[in-house]
Amino acid sequence: MQALNSWLHDVFITPSVLETLVWLTLVSAVGILLGKLRVGKISLGITFVFFVGILFAHFGVRVDPEMNSFAQTLGLALFVYALGVEVGPSFFPSLKSQGVLYNTLGLMVIGLGLTVVVALHYIFGISMPNMLGIMAGAVTNTPMLAAVQSTMQDALGSAGARQVADLALGCALTYPLGVVGMILAILTLNILDPKRHKRNEEENSRNTYITELELTNEALFGKTILEAVRLEEKHFIISRIWRGDTLIIPSSQTVLHEGDHLLVLVHPEDVEEMEQFFGRRAESRDWNRPDIDWDAIDSQLVSKRIIITNSKVNGAKLGALRLRNQYGINITRIDRAGIEILATPDLHLQLGDRLSVVGEAQEIERASKFLGDSINVLDKPKLFSFFFGLAVGCILGSIPLAIPGLSMPIKLGLAGGPIIVGILMGAFGARLRIATYMSNSATQLIKQLGIILYLAGLGLASGEHFFEMIIHGDGLLWIGLGFLITYLPTMAVGLLSLFGYKKTHAETVGMLCGVMANSMALDYAMSINESRSSSVAYAIVYPVGMFVRIISAQILLSFFL
């Protein structure tokens, strides 16, 4: 019996590597299980791991602090780097469409939030570090919390251990209302804009627009498509030509005739210029509907999606492959990480790109073999590029950056460095012939594993004084202030987006959820909006919002240390 007690004591009570690992995994398992609970359409998901860790720590669970710190650090780095690699391929293309406006609005949310934080700091006399902890929970951004904690540790050393712990307490207190406050803002904006500016939201979520034009410009009669392309600065693709009852899949040498009906793919903002260049619109149907049966339209032709899996094609320019001349196929659009991209000649292809092509069945089959089109190849993870990029990101995050006017240098930290390198690797790795593609399931596994490790460790590290803070401290005040930080900036910018920029409700709340890093509220927003605009806006704003919050919080803190 004594041996059993000794064994149980070693496994569950004596702080050690084993004991820390056991409690981290138990906290994670219980938190994931509770995360499946829903109240109506609302669920905290894996955030329950954080609160389970707090609860366990409150009832006396103590773990090895160095081991726990390592688990948090590793988990955070894995999460933000995998996030960067995931959004990298579509990040820069997204900025060419609605991305600039979305991110501008997102930066306004962040700026207003910081203004509210400074105002509340002076009104209530709460220290700036604690206000930033409150803000981290209010905007549901735990990587921001990690960056502020790292800055505090660098500035105060071991003497500031309790202050660093209080940061996490502030985050824990305000996190639940950070989710609820965001959902309340979504509901309020929905009430204020009940019609949600109904229009073709699917069109606004695309980076490409399909229009049918009748050729009436005499200057183009008898010109080849290649010659027409050279006459117009804007990018466009002619995917099909109707000449009477004959359907033609054009090549660069196809000659244009008067009265040809051209199916043209362009950026949405260039549609009017294309009308002036080619001729009047002659749309017999809405070509942007997702339910169009292209196979029936093309009759003898085949429409197919081909996945780039040939490593030799990775990083190659689309125009350099001469697919239209070699195989007689037309690439109508390219899907990259959920964002549709116009198939321009100077576009660098990447592993995992999905090409929508039209042509004869036999030629498409030949093109498929050349491009790869083997999903099994993508199932093999590219581990070298992952670990190399993660290492570079960690090194980048540790470099002190001196900014004039600040009392101390700031660091991107393990939240900022890896996400920057991840985005760059995802966006430009192909040009360096570095394969960075990971399947969606692999990416989600790494992200979930990373954030769960971080949240479990954070909860165990900060839960000892959690309930004491609520009962005997300023916990209730902090919760109220956190709600103001959540609600006021989102409502102000949300109304500007709806009524100033005439964006749809789905686009607006997707952007707000992205800058607040609030995937729980996004799930709710998508449940009341039958549109993918919310998820597209979220994906565009999320990485920029994450990076700016991490940096701006450190800069603000440095003024008050």
Image (cartoon, grey):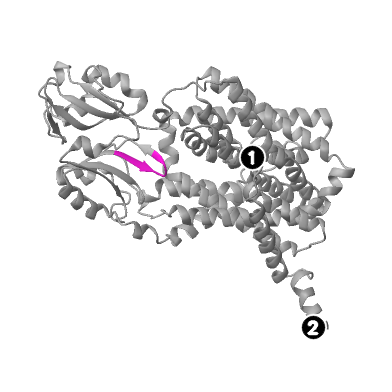
Q: Is residue 265 magenta?
A: no
User: Residue 287, position in %: x, y?
Assistant: 30, 29
Q: Residue furthest front?
A: 40
Residue density around tag 1, few if under 14, some if 14–19, many if 20 or more, within 10 Å: few
User: Which image quadrant is residue 490 in?
Assistant: top right
Select label 2 or label 1 by which is in front: 1
Judged left or right of residue 447, residue 409 is right
Could you give the CA–CA distance between mark 2 and mark 1, rounded to whole angstroms? 49 Å
> Please, is residue 141 above or below residue 121 in the view?
below
The span shown in magenta is 333-339
Q: Is residue 337 magenta?
A: yes
**N-terminal-most mark, 2 or 1:** 2
SS at mark 2 in the image: helix
> Please, is residue 223 above or below residue 71 in the view?
above
Residue visible at 35% across and 35% down?
A: 290
User: Quadrant location of the C terminus?
Assistant: top right
> Residue 3's mark?
2
Q: Is residue 22 something that shows in the picture?
A: yes
Q: Is residue 561 something that shows in the picture?
A: no
User: Residue 192, position in %: x, y?
Assistant: 60, 20
The secondary structure that dominates the magenta segment is strand
Numbered-mark total: 2
Q: Disc 1 marks which residue?
A: 40
Residue visible at 63% across and 23% down?
A: 492
Q: Residue furthest right?
A: 472
Query: In the rendered structure, which amino acid carries the disc numbered 1?
Result: Gly
Residue visible at 43% across and 28% down?
A: 201
**Which of the pair 266/315 is nearer the observer?**
266
Query: In the rendered structure, which amino acid carries the disc numbered 2?
Result: Ala
User: Residue 519, position in %: x, y?
Assistant: 58, 42
Judged left or right of residue 296, residue 53 is right
SS at mark 1 in the image: loop
